[in-house]
Image (cartoon, rainbow, N blue to C red):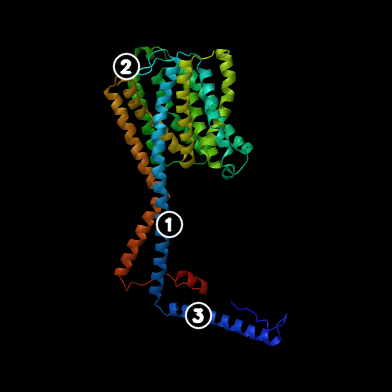
Amino acid sequence: TLQIKNRNSVFPSAEEVMEDSSLLREARGQDKENKNNKYEALMCQPYHKRCEQQVQLQQFSSLKEISMSSRRAATLGISIFPLICMMWLSVSFVPLGMQCIMRSAQCTRWGPNGGGYSQALWVTFSELCFVGLALSPSLFFGKKIVGGSLRKLARNCAPAGLVFGIKYATSHLALRITPASIYALLHCSIVFFVVLSSWLVLNETINFFEALACCGLILGTAIISVSSFSHNAQEQSSVSVFGITLTLFDCALGGVVIVLLRQAMLRNKRALQVTCFKTLIGAVPVFPLALFIHGLPTPPSMHQLYIFIIVALIILIYHSVLSALCAIAPAVVVAFIEALKTLPSFIIIAIVRGVPETSNLFWLGAIVVLASALFFKIVRTSRSSLFRAFTNSRQSCDEDDDESQQPNRAVLTPPKIYETDEIEQDV
């Protein structure tokens, strides 16, 4: 650093200015000479040495990026596994809890008895309001991180919330007039609607092998549902065209909800806030439908209220985890994870209510579902950018090893004209 010397005067003299200017020119000359010496020292090396140094720098930077990406992927994989487990557990207990509220029979083989509350849509409306109000304190935290006001957040979550409310009401109506096995059989088509909606809304596509894995998942779930349907004569006599149509409409709405939720989470990275607005907005279309079908609600008893709070907490966990998964995974992957709930639900039902009657057809469908999930995971991993970067780096390292074993091989690429700044960066 050059400083101008003030010799008992406010302004420096002409001699002092000339002296400082000469010092500055000398410093610049030394800096330029050092750069030229570095340039000449590097250019005096053979061409293949310079190329080797450049290739080593490129490989080092690429391997550094891969290691950072692998650490991020490992952290993401560790965080997504408990989310998937929580989602499977909660989605397995939700239908059991809803049946426990609306039926007076024994909920589990250990007890207690059900609530016997017959107004299903009022139960849905109350649960959505409970979840939204329970998550409302999250709206006042992290608004700067969300990147906008609450009005903007509500506007982003409004499409997902409205479709979610209509879908929830349609699900309850479909379950009342459609057998459970037929509902599960048709509900596996939600993967198709998610793929179609994600392509139209989010421009997320899948390749041929991922589509083949989705078809295998649908086939396996269909085999499981057919095995359950063939063992129940009461369900065979209660199939109707209107129930099947309503169930298919419910599946289409379910696919659209996952895609719209994914879109909302891409804009707002807060799962609890998005879930709060989604459930509160979703309760709006359920209210007039419940009022039209059931009339005014009857007040629940203490036993019914106790079961209702437990089921509402399970629903809160499920929808919060679903929003978090939509933030870190594509919509097709989330739909695939949710469609795999058949086997965890079977395990939960076997523990809570005893092992149900099964056949060889059921286990065949389970094997097809697991094989499809494994195939989808392999294809998705091979399609990831981290896997491609690691493969390309290994190929480049193998090519460099081959070139080092052939030192007299001619280099066909033209030499690069180095600038001084580029030489320093390469070094």
Indicate the quadrant where residue 359 lies.
top left
Residue at coordinates 32% horizontally, 16% vertically from top-left?
A: 231
Compare residues 218 and 333 and report the one nearer the observer: 333
Residue at 31% across, 29% down: 366
The three-letter code of the residue at mark 1 reads Glu
- The residue closer to the viewer here, 17 or 248, is 17
Tell which of 384 and 32 is nearer to you: 32
What's under tag 2, amino acid-wise? His
Nearer to us of marks 3 and 2 is: 3
Q: Earlier in the sequence, mark 3 or mark 1?
A: 3
Q: Secondary structure at mark 3?
A: helix
Q: Position of residue 282 (x, y in %)?
A: 56, 27
Q: Amino acid at mark 3?
A: Asn
Which residue is identified by label 2? 231
Rounded to the nearest angstrom, the CA distance separating label 2 from label 1 is 56 Å
Can residue 64 be seen in this snapshot?
Answer: yes
Q: Which mark is residue 65?
A: 1
